[in-house]
Amino acid sequence: MASRRQNTASPDPRTPGQLQRRLGVLDSTAIGLGSMLGAGVFVVFAPAAALAGPLLAVAVALAGLIAYCNAVASAQLAAQYPSSGGTYIYGRTRLGEWPGFIAGWGFVTGKTASCAAMALTFGHYAAPDFATPLAVSAVVVLTGVNLLGITRTALLTRILLAVVLATLAFVAAASMLGPHPASDGAAASAAAAGGWGVLPAAGLMFFAFAGYARIATLGEEVKDPTRTIPRAILAALAAAFVIYLGMALLLQWHLPAEQLAGSTAPLLDAVTSSALSAGAPFVQAGAAAACLGALLALITGVGRTAMAMARERDLPSPLARVGGANTVPFLAELTVAAAVILLLLSTNVLTVVGFSSFGVLVYYSVTNAAAFTLSARPWHAPRWLNVLGFLGCLVLAVTLPPASVLGMAAVLAVGVAGRFLVLRLRRRKAAA
């Protein structure tokens, strides 16, 4: 079948309309890890703890397991199809146009909302009284960085990632130094939130692990993709898992259960409740840097996926234009930035973590289904891993908070209906 043909050819760097291969293993890993250690690490533990209670570490481990399944599937596919667009391309090639569209639409809409959430989180940490204007400014500046070229994006991501890692190390030290709360009834009362709450908590935690998708969506700009992409994806995921699990255990040990579950800034609370409370401004600065790093990588990934969808006419074709001295999809980047700014000016988007998680879990269910069809498989990627990843994504998606499930399901339905109508119009014009 034509849809099953493997396309391992690399774009000619001199071909007009193609992106340049400039990213190595280090840059690709930094972009993926920078995406996973974004705003999520500073906010996601609180709502996850409210759902999972004392089983927070179990939720982190479950999210990490499903993320590993997805990462292996992404690495397999990205190595064989090193083009911008990630699972949108894999789904179209291996499964058909509709699965590819659903994956791409879920990614673009969910991650556009995530961009707005991260920008606004940056504004609240940096200057709460001017959060929205500062968030808009951040989107404008980082879009400008992306338009300068992918190597500038990778350089800034590495700088911001170093700041975030230093901040997390400081929070860990503060949590270990104490003082620590005495055991009381808070932990017992929080236990009621555990049990079935582990599944929706894992779904929320998955939001934090999803950054490795950025490596796959940049596949057209990675040098030696067959070797680089799998290594970068697995390295970024392994590092993020160790950090998230360690932070979950430290926060539960250091903060009272009720305080952790109700916190809007759990890492900041961990420092202010410690012997190193004077370092709170450092944590605020680190959180701001994390949001900027994740926002930078997200705008890049969403823009590339939008470009790939436009190439196939699933989005307006002008979004596929690549130009400038640095060969970037400038119109797609500008469109994403405009959509994010519109969200910032029109609504409060701090509650979109669940919406984004649902969209991304649907995206990765398509990834696993596409990887299942591959015949050439490395030893560490058996088919049963794809089955586990597919089922795990669907279970975590449907167990998210109902508002998140219904909201993103409606967005996906609008996209499907819109594409159906466009295809009907095209067929009528062709027949006329």
Image: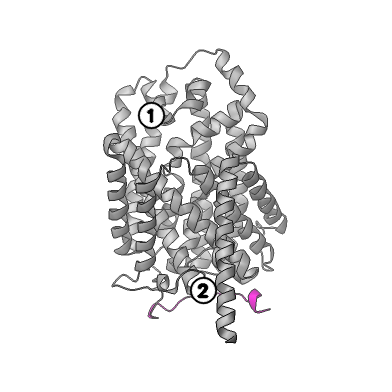
Residue under the image location 29 percent in, 31 percent down: 281
Image vertical order of residue 195 relative to residue 376, above or below:
above
Instruction: Give the structural element (helix, strand or loop) at label 1.
Output: helix
In this rendering, does residue 230 appear at all? no
Residue under the image location 39 percent in, 65 percent down: 332
In this rendering, does residue 375 appear at all? yes
> Which quadrant: the C terminus?
bottom right
The magenta stretch is: 1-16
Give the percent coordinates (x, y) of residue 430.
Answer: 57, 85
Q: Earlier in the sequence, mark 1 or mark 2?
A: 1
Q: What kind of residue is marked 2?
A: Glu
Image vertical order of residue 234 relative to residue 206, above or below:
below
Give the percent coordinates (x, y) of residue 157.
Answer: 35, 52
The main secondary structure of the magenta stretch is loop
Front position in the image: 209 or 97: 97
> Which quadrant: the N terminus?
bottom right
Asked if the stretch drawn in magenta spans residue 18, the answer is no
Contact between marks 1 and 2 (CB within 8 A): the answer is no
Which residue position is annotated with label 2? 312
Which residue position is annotated with label 1? 268
Front position in the image: 180 or 336: 336
